[in-house]
Image: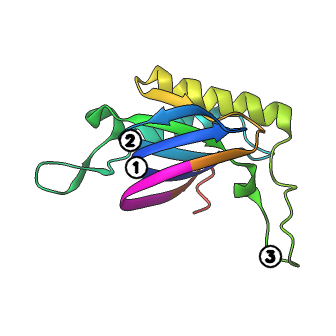
Amino acid sequence: MRAVVQRVARGSVSVEGSTVAVIGPGIVVLLGVGRDDGPEDAAYLSGKIANLRIFEDDGGKLNRSLLDVKGSALVVSQFTLYGDCRQGRRPGFSDAAPAGPGKELYELFVSGLAGLGVNVATGVFQARMLVEIVNDGPVTLLLDSKKRF
């Protein structure tokens, strides 16, 4: 599983002109599910992200987690995080999970965050979405459950 985590002042998702999710301060997680991912990847990444110390303490240091600040998470599925651009001009997506297993693991990740006490909002799996992100900092991190980067 791969995630782009952005600390945000606010974020939202719209589908077909209707807003389906809105959060205030917290994080937006763009989440890609890989062909070889399983439940352990969802558990690892949800725990890692909920506890990442990316929010400032009173001294201005990044010492607080999403749980500490009681922030929200907006989770948006994004299979393109598994796009392979090493050859040619068109990305290949053979490393991305098929829709069925991808959706199951996406939902497992969302449940994992919620189970840790995070207020979670989501986009719509496989929909064409407009995602608005007001990055705070900016703080943007890349995570991979297989620890490839």
Say which residue appears at 11% left-offset and 49% top-offset: 58
Three-letter amino acid code at the position of disc 1: Val
Three-letter amino acid code at the position of disc 3: Arg
Say which residue appears at 69% left-offset and 33% top-offset: 124
Three-letter amino acid code at the position of disc 2: Gly
Residue 148, x across and y down, in percent:
62, 60
In this view, the residue in front, 115 or 7, is 7
Q: Could you say which disc has been placed on residue 26 in the image?
A: 2
Per the model, the C-alpha gap separating discs 3 and 1 is 31 Å
Q: Which secondary structure is most common in the magenta stretch?
A: strand
Magenta stretch, residue numbers? 132-141
Q: Please tell me which of labels 1 and 2 falls first in the chain.
A: 1
Per the model, the C-alpha gap separating discs 2 and 3 is 33 Å
- The residue labelled by disc 1 is 8
39 with respect to 67 (left or right): right
Q: Could you say which disc has been placed on residue 93 in the image?
A: none
12 with respect to 39 (left or right): left
- The residue labelled by disc 3 is 86
Q: Please tell me which of labels 3 and 1 falls first in the chain.
A: 1
Let me know if residue 30 is in the magenta part: no
Q: Nearer the viewer, mark 3 or mark 1?
A: 1
Query: Quarter-wise, where is residue 119 in the image?
Result: top left
Say which residue appears at 80% left-offset and 76% top-offset: 86
Query: Quarter-wise, where is residue 138 in the image?
Result: bottom left
Say which residue appears at 42% left-offset and 27% top-offset: 118
